[in-house]
Image (cartoon, grey):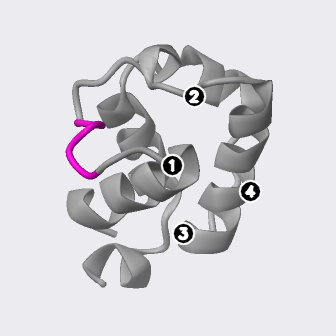
């Protein structure tokens, strides 16, 4: 996983134009953030990156970069190099 892949997945999930979401974007300020996109985020993390992160951990993430850091911690070393 790299930042470009992660941001592209978020843009697709939230159905926003490329460049709308950045590493310093506040998660809950992303256009379209809702309980439904939160569920979609959980599914996307599992499907796209093969990680399962506790709901409370996701909720403690303030920015996209915070979430990326949590995903990186949970990724297998082989996937991080991809």
Secondary element at tag 3: helix
**On the rendered structure, is 22 left or right of 39?**
left
Name the magenta segment's main secondary structure. Answer: loop
Q: Which mark is residue 49?
A: 3
Q: Which residue is mark 4?
A: 43
Q: State how far apart marks 4 and 1 are (Cα).
A: 15 Å
Q: Which residue is mark 2?
A: 32
Instruction: Determine contact: label 4, label 1, CB under 8 Å.
Output: no
Badge nearest the viewer, 3 or 4: 4
Q: State how far apart marks 3 and 2 are (Cα).
A: 22 Å
Q: Which residue is mark 1?
A: 15
Q: State how far apart marks 2 and 1 are (Cα).
A: 8 Å
Location of residue 12 with respect to 17 vertically, above or below: below
Task: State which tag comes first along the sequence, 4 or 1.
Answer: 1
Badge nearest the viewer, 4 or 2: 2
Image position, residue 75 (x, y; %) = 49, 65
Instruction: Determine contact: label 2, label 1, CB under 8 Å.
Output: yes
Task: State which tag comes first along the sequence, 3 or 4.
Answer: 4
Task: State which tag comes first along the sequence, 1 or 3.
Answer: 1
Instruction: Determine contact: label 4, label 2, CB under 8 Å.
Output: no
Mark 3 Cα within 10 Å, few/some/many (few <14, many 20+)? many
Secondary element at tag 2: loop
């Amino acid at each position: 996983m790299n930042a470009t892949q992660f941001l592209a997945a978020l843009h697709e999930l939230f159905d926003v134009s490329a460049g709308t979401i950045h590493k310093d974007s506040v998660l809950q300020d992303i256009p379209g953030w809702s309980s439904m996109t939160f569920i979609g985020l959980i599914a996307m993390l599992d499907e796209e990156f093969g990680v399962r992160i506790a709901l409370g951990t996701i909720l403690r993430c303030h920015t996209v970069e915070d979430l990326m850091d949590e995903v990186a911690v949970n990724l297998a070393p082989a996937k991080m190099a991809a």
